[in-house]
Image (tube, helix red, strand yellow):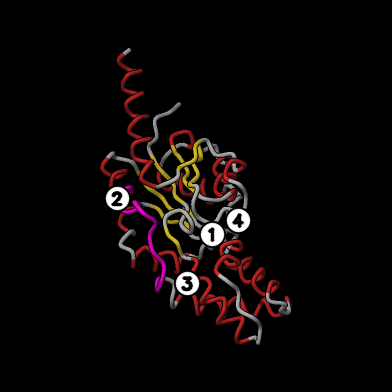
Amino acid sequence: MTCPEAIIFDLDGTLVDSARDLQDATNVVLAEEGLRSVGLDEIKSMVGDGVAKLVERAVAAAGGDPGRLPVLLPRFLAVYEANASRHTVTYAGVPETLAGLRRLGLKLALVTNKPFTATVEILGALSLRSFFEVVIGGDALAERKPHPAPVLLALKQLGVEPEAAIMIGDNYHDVQAAREAGVRAFAVTYGYSHRPHAELGAERLMDTMAELVPLIEAEFALEVARQQA
């Protein structure tokens, strides 16, 4: 096992709880269409595949016309990007974990299916932007997670080989993208997973983000012991 040089994070459901702001923007769009609002649990079940899929799922759930999606998607983006950080918060232990990983000398990247503009707005509002050397938004490439291309792009920009990186996410999109890129995958047991966590195929499950730094420190210690043996 190669000692990690970089950690790649998902955003929504992993580092931040953004469901309330996504719900608010979605319900503005639905109300303008004369449709019912969607609940917070509904929104959480729709997150992960990018904003186009989120809007598509919300419109379908509310009984709307799918033919309106080309109009509703840009409207959603306009509303959401203006309010992306109003209620969004970090999960417990996230800032401390990112700081701890940087102190260990690790490179950090963010790979999300969220559009770049909203992503950097959230990172800036929550004072997280400076932790990341690389930020890949969902509009950076034609492909999004679970395709491995965004993860591979992050690795290229970091200058790190796949076997020297770990991906941290909350959903199957993250685990699949990581594994197809040749990257180890850890998953958190909170967030917005669409599947039981045991079925995600992650190498390790973490109940809190605070578990990550001790896990990495243990891997460093094993590597030192191996070299001294």
Front residue of this view, candidates 227 and 209: 209
The numbered mark, 2 or 3, whose residue comes first in the sequence reads: 3
Numbered range of the magenta stretch: 85-97
The numbered mark, 4 or 3, whose residue comes first in the sequence reads: 3
Kind of element beneath mark 1:
loop
Task: Judge depth for marks 2 and 4 and give the one in front.
Answer: 2
Please tell me which residue is depicted at 60% across the width and 56% down the height of the picture: 143
The local crowd at label 4, few if under 14, some if 14 to 19, many if 20 or more residues have their Cα within 10 Å, is few
The amino acid at mark 4 is: Glu
| Alpha-carbon span between mark 2 and mark 1 | 24 Å
For label 2, the residue is 96
> In the image, residue 33 lies at what x, y percent?
65, 86
| Alpha-carbon span between mark 4 and mark 3 | 25 Å
Q: Is residue 91 above or below residue 85?
A: above
The numbered mark, 3 or 1, whose residue comes first in the sequence reads: 3
Task: Judge depth for marks 3 and 1 and give the one in front.
Answer: 3
The numbered mark, 4 or 1, whose residue comes first in the sequence reads: 1
Task: Judge depth for marks 2 and 1 and give the one in front.
Answer: 2
Q: How many labels does the image show?
A: 4
For label 4, the residue is 143
| Alpha-carbon span between mark 3 and mark 1 | 16 Å
The local crowd at label 2, few if under 14, some if 14 to 19, many if 20 or more residues have their Cα within 10 Å, is few
Identify the mark at residue 21; answer none if there is no mark.
Answer: 3
Identify the mark at residue 113; answer none if there is no mark.
Answer: 1
Front residue of this view, candidates 150 and 97: 97
The amino acid at mark 3 is: Asp
The quadrant of the image that shows the N terminus is top left
> In the image, residue 91 lies at what x, y percent?
39, 56
Front residue of this view, candidates 226 and 198: 198
> In the image, residue 67 lies at what x, y percent?
73, 78
